[in-house]
Image (cartoon, rainbow, N blue to C red):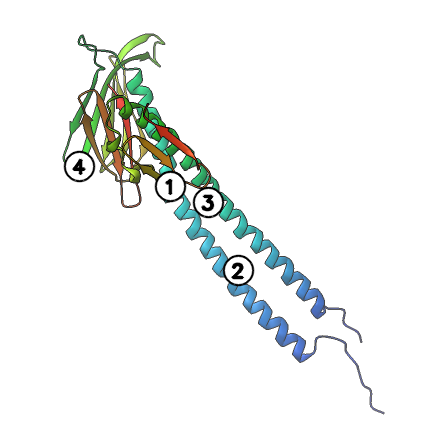
Amino acid sequence: MKSNGFILVELLVALTICAITMGLFVHSSKNRAQMLILLEENYSSERLKNDFLILAKIKKIDEINPKHYLPLEIEVTRNEVEIKSKRLKNIVLQND
Amino acid sequence: MTRRNHITAFTLLELLIALTLSGLLIVMINQQIQNSFFVDSRYKNQLEYRLKIETIFDFLSADISQSSYFPDGKKSVKTIQGVENIKIIIKRFGLSPINKEISGMTVIWTLGSDGISRTIRSDSMSQTRYFSTKKVSSGYKNIDGSTLRVIIENDDFSKSKLFLL
């Protein structure tokens, strides 16, 4: 009598496929988070530009609060605002 | 005469390895499923909610930019600080959804303990739309009389936007 069941190699292949599927799932979750952060950074960047233009006219750039533009990292000096985030690096808003 | 059946199936060692790996996989899948529910809820409560706040600022900005003007040239935007919320009252023109005619209307934004809502009042109708029912702390600051800063915050974030009046 001969039983044709799974052999160990087949089982390992199935487990490997399961592990790869789980890995892809984790990866897609991370991508989703990154995409949402990227969108928020874009929104914050546009909001910062709008606020900077208004405050530059009345010469009150120091009213900019960096906490209000997170996850965008910014540095406010007397005359300019520099965006320090990785993706939007080297953007400097200057008061002419 | 003895008859011997030789069955080719899993050996005990193979079975133990398979059971161990299966157990490991079940634990991992269980953790993964629980984690995915937690992460999904976190994304919805934090990241997606913060994006919603950004769009609310855009809606508010559109209302303020379309507001009518007082005789002194300033926009018809009034702010009221309540105990647990603030109200931003904007007078503007808009298209009535009932008779499709342009009419004057009052837009009231309420930000605070009941969430964020926008009420439109005109002679023919009154309608409230809730953008969010989550509690937020809100405030405003008048900078030099012609600039309004609206602040929306909770435990996870703090955002503000400036509007020219």
Q: In the rendered structure, the residue with mark 3 lies on which chain?
A: A
What amino acid is labelled 2 in the image?
Ile
- Identify the residue position indicated by label 3 in the image: A33
**CB under 8 Å between discs 1 and 4:** no
Q: Do the dots labelled 4 and 3 sit on one chain?
A: no
User: For the point 14% across and 35% down, which residue is it?
Assistant: B83
User: For the point 50% across and 57% down, which residue is it?
Assistant: B32
Residue B119 visible in the shown view: no
- Identify the residue position indicated by label 4 in the image: B84
Disc 4 secondary structure class: loop
Q: In the rendered structure, the residue with mark 2 lies on which chain?
A: B
Nearer to us: label 1 or label 2: 1
Q: Do the dots labelled 2 and 3 sit on one chain?
A: no
What amino acid is labelled 1 in the image?
Pro
Q: Is A44 positioned to the left or the right of B23 in the image?
A: left
The mark total stands at 4
What whole-number distance in Å separates the C-alpha atoms at marks 4 and 2?
44 Å
Camera-nearest residue between B128 and B75:
B75
Q: In the rendered structure, the residue with mark 4 lies on which chain?
A: B
Q: Is A37 positioned to the left or the right of A55 in the image?
A: right
Disc 3 secondary structure class: helix
Displayed quadrant of residue A96 = top left
What amino acid is labelled 4 in the image?
Glu
